[in-house]
Amino acid sequence: MMLNLSKKRYRLRIVDPAYPAFNIYSYSARRTTALGPVCVATSASKIENWDVEIIDENNLRWYGPKADLRGANHEFLQGTRPADIVGLYGGLTSTIPRLYKIARFYKEKGIITIAGGQHFAGENIEEGLSSGIDYIVIGEGEETIRELILALMGKKDLLDVKGIAYKENGKTIYTEKRDPITDFDKLPLPDFSLVRYANIQVYPVERIRGCGMDCEFCTVKGKPRPASAEKLIERISFLLETKDARKFFIVDDLFCQDRGETIRFCKMLRDYQKNVGRRLDLGVQIRLDKANDTELLRAMRSAGINFIAMGLESPVGEELEAMNKRLKPSDMLEQIKVFRKFGFLMHGMFIFGYPMREGIGFRMPVNERIKHFKEFIKKSRLDTIQVLLPIPLPGTELRTRLLREKRVYARQDLGWEYYDGNFLLFEPDELITPEELQRAPMKIMGKIYQFKYMFKVSLNVFYFPSLIFSLHNIKAGWKRWYRLWRQAVIRFAGWITMQKWQSAFKKNGFLKKLRKAEDNLKKLNPG
């Protein structure tokens, strides 16, 4: 399919599909946007005579054109601003059913459709090309999208565009593989003004792509590829100076994969804030063992890095070993104490019920595991937590292993929309029933996110003067009060989110679907 070359201007619309209705991440999504579509859209916007826009269906604000159920009203969008090409972001597997629905809508109107993102790997490429998608971008998209658009305009041979897949005469064509980007200086600054309707309060930025940790369950692989510290400073300063942005999240899978450059970045950001007279608020994802690096932690705090998310995964050593995690439960609590001492707000990310490999004799009943998690979380004094179930995501070693062991429930029974970490998707280990494992994360999080924190929010406001002025250091008193107040607000908000999710969960009838999936798996693999 080629473009209508008689037009003077063209439009590319990139869509970030809406989460399923029963997703727990909707609140966070309304405050930010995905970085990948912005980077790709920015690159495409540099092509002469092309207008580009991003529709983030999870962040439409009150005046965004909404559909009856969820997502954007694409009939309205296409009627008011017709797109010549529609790009679809498949970064989250749970949004794929919505992505396919949007693709078919535009395909029926004769619009060229392109998709990309981490979901599209292996067998999923064939599925995508049979679900309303004309072209799939494999890997990073900034360079590919420009070349693909030029090819669709007849200015380049389609076979010369590296890193794409498409159908031709019923046959799937894969072009030459595209190497990962290593020179990030040649990429333009991400242009967040391309995101229509969204209310972005927390801006995603990045310096390093890739991760060398090789966790079995993770889709992010490969040698880390860093941009310079100057490049990240440029991105942050541009957003502050043009958008008055104050809150940022560095989306690198692991902050400080190259220590020296990370410390240099922190010092540069500290000095920049002093020079412009603005204080920024940043969050990062970091490994727990960085607690041993005092110089790094001091540099981070001086730069305004206040929030850290840590992949703690499990307090059970055997589970950590199965994940290929280089953590020891005996060290974890002490390392968390160090981060707390430095004043970081800490978010702990856990995976419950990780499946053991064949031949490993370790077995633990679900109630005993829950007890381990609750005790660890209480001792850790983490500000916030999330407990998810393992997800056999496409392209991961975990999915390959569980498929080989014939433990993954069929997608005809449990579709992609359930691949968000809140639903059981495989046969659990011995001594654990599927329903027990499905209910366990909410039992753990229910000890943290409770209704009582509504009253603690009010009490913290009431006790504000006495707490602040009872301490000799008013600044220290403020930080202590703010931490308690913030914790109470988030934990009460978390309770509300859990109530909404559980209500949607009951209406969805997932447990009935889970039993059917379990029965069908046993029929396929008797004995």
Image: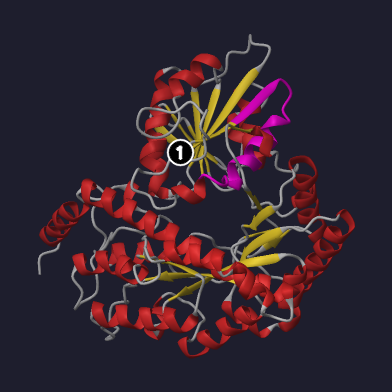
> 7 or 438, which lies in front?
438
- Tell me residue 262's x, y (percent): 75, 68
- Which image quadrant is residue 192 in? top right
**As displayed, is residue 239 above or below residue 477?**
above
Q: Measuring from the top left, give residue 344's x and y in whole percent.
A: 63, 72
Residue 300 pos. (x, y %)? 73, 71
Residue 151 magenta: no
Query: Furthest residue to the right?
Result: 275
Residue at 39% x, 54% y is 497
* Relative to 501, residue 474 above or below: below
Kindly identify which residue carries mark 1.
17
Q: Secondary structure at mark 1?
A: loop
Q: Is residue 136 visible?
A: no
Part of the protein shown in magenta: 30-53
Residue 188 location (% of width, % of height):
75, 42
Q: Indicate left or right for 408 with 433 as reference.
A: right
316 up-or-down from 518: above or below: below
Kind of residue sitting beneath label 1: Pro
Residue density around tag 1, few if under 14, some if 14–19, many if 20 or more, within 10 Å: many
